[in-house]
Amino acid sequence: MAKQDYYEILGVSRDADQEELKKAYRKLAMRWHPDRNPGDVEAEKRFKELSEAYDVLKDDQKRGAYDRFGHAAFEGGQGGARGGFDFAQGFADIFEEMFGDATGRRGGGGRGSDLRYNMEILLEEAFRGSEKTIRVPTHAACEACNGTGAEAGSRPISCPTCRGQGKIRAQQGFFTIERTCPACGGAGRVIEKPCKSCGGAGRVRKEKTLSVTIPPGVEDGTRIRLAGEGEAGLRGSPPGDLYIFLSIAPHRFFQRDGASIHCRVPIPMTTAALGGQIEVPTLDGTFAKVNVSAGTQSGQQFRLKGKGMSVLRSNSRGDLYVQAIVETPVNLTKRQQELLREFEGAGGKDKTSPESAGFFQKVKEFWSDLRE
């Protein structure tokens, strides 16, 4: 069965540049990677085909041979190199090179892994900003060897296998293949006398205590980056970063919508009917006065400018929206019940309660139309 064209496998044109090739491979490799499709034989096959195609096309020399001779350039066929080429050996190297940060895998001698810390804060803390202290389990540089991984008094030496280059080359046909040195993992150095405290890794398991500044106005899902506070790299390699993902706990009284704050406030029926003044809480811990107009209905909103949420990296604030919830009286005394009955008997419902009067009138008209 004829092999599929490498350009078709990656979904690119034959004149695609290296950036287009890389983007196409990255997108498809993330989709078909075996770690994301456990037990899926078809996904594993597709991933191998993608890696094989990218391994050839990303190299100008191999790509030129492929463009000229096709698959025969690697199968010992007409015009091709004798002995073939073992592409499967390079799958992991290609994927790790492109996606090391996303999967947590890194080449030897690379920087330490990035860490994630989930933090929940109160809405008040998001409003005014806060200083938080957190404890993060991580790998820190070994103090006994200063992160080198070598016993005190000794130092890492140049790797004899790759002569300090971190890579080795092998000739296959008319191709020169360059790979990470298996002896030093790409670091270019090896340790003759490993540190007893860290076993030569240059880092140890440790819990770090860090201070985190929460700026005023942060939103749910905000990410804060603490550079260099991730895991220490192996044998003196640079550390990764720590990313703090913020979530804001639901509030008892307030609901946030960007810079706006919403608050539902119950008001007595008499205040809603006659008008008056009420006090409502705000996020800064004070109370604001709201003038309630006569005839206020449930659901009516009052806007208080500049009483809402802090705006990130700004001295301004959003607005506070107060939604009135008219409360029906309960536990009435006999005298109060008498007064309400007198009010009800006085008539004039079409004026004092136009919404309900109009609704029932529309219902009557609706049923009359049905009868006709």
Image: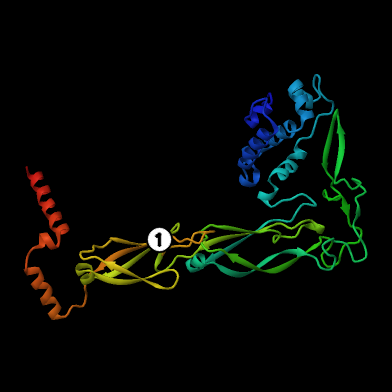
Residue matched to label 1 = 319
Q: Position of residue 184 (x, y in %)?
A: 85, 51
Whether residue 43 is visible here, answered yes or no, is: no
- In-front residue for pair 255/87: 255
Residue 133 visible? The answer is yes
The extreme front residue here reads: 315
User: Is 368 situated left or right of 12 in this image?
Assistant: left
> For residue 308, what is the image quadrant?
bottom left
Q: Secondary structure at mark 1?
A: loop
Question: Residue drawn 83% across and 35% down?
Answer: 177
Tell me residue 157's x, y (percent). Answer: 92, 54
Q: Residue at x 59, y 69 (%)?
A: 131
- The quadrant of the image that shows the C terminus is top left
Would you say 154 lies left or right of 301 here?
right
Q: Residue at x 60, y 66 (%)?
A: 213
Question: Residue 304, percent across and down?
Answer: 36, 63
Q: Say above or below: 302 vs 47.
A: below
How many residues crowd mark 1 within 10 Å: few (<14), some (14–19), many (20+)?
some
Name the kind of residue labelled 1 in the image.
Asp
